[in-house]
Image (spheres, rainbow, N blue to C red):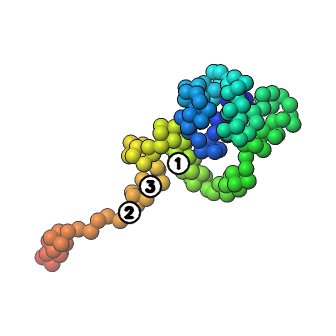
Amino acid sequence: MLIKDQIRARREQLGISIVDLAEKIGVTDQAVRHWESGRSNPSKRLAQKVESVLDFRLDWTEGARHSGSASTMNALLDQQDIDLLLVICRLPFDAKTLIGEFARLHLAALDRGGRAINERESTRPIPAFIEKKQHAKPKPESKRQEASARTRKTKA
């Protein structure tokens, strides 16, 4: 796994935003974005801070050593993640799609500073909820409309 992917995966696993990670390390959020995009790598001094803050070891061989990549993967996954993935695997495709959409919306909101609730109205609605609204019962007619309908039936 590449350095950029290791940093991003561990940060996301811990639920830390780019801005929070940057503040804890003492760099700009742009520096963290550069690391996660692969544009640059942290210096040795900053890499030690990254490892300390994220509580894991970077694999500088980027998976070239087979045994090293296994230990890196073990550091990135915990048993709760594995259990959750196993539960998600048993869900129907539509449910998996909804979970994926929710996760992407949530992570995007965190990257924007955690304004998910306020900005929810500006995102597109989730298809399953649209479908339920379309199948909802029509509203009952007003009493006036019901009375005029009864009058028409009586006259006929």
Q: In front here: 119 or 47?
A: 47
> Disc number at residue 40?
none
Q: Residue furthest bottom?
A: 154
In the rendered image, residue 123, in percent from the top left (x then y), is placed at: 42, 43
> Disc number at residue 129?
3
Q: On the rendered image, what quadrant is the N terminus found in?
A: top right
Q: Are the residues tagged 3 and 1 within 8 Å (C-beta)?
A: no
Is 106 on the left or on the right of 88, as rendered?
Answer: left
* Residue at x 27% of width, y 68% of height: 140
Cα distance between the residues tagged 1 and 2: 24 Å
User: Which label's residue is closer to the chain start, 3 or 2?
Assistant: 3
> Disc number at residue 102?
1
Q: Does dot 2 land on a helix, a strand or a loop?
A: loop
Q: Are the residues tagged 1 and 2 within 8 Å (C-beta)?
A: no
> Disc number at residue 136?
2
In the rendered image, residue 155, in percent from the top left (x then y), is placed at: 12, 76
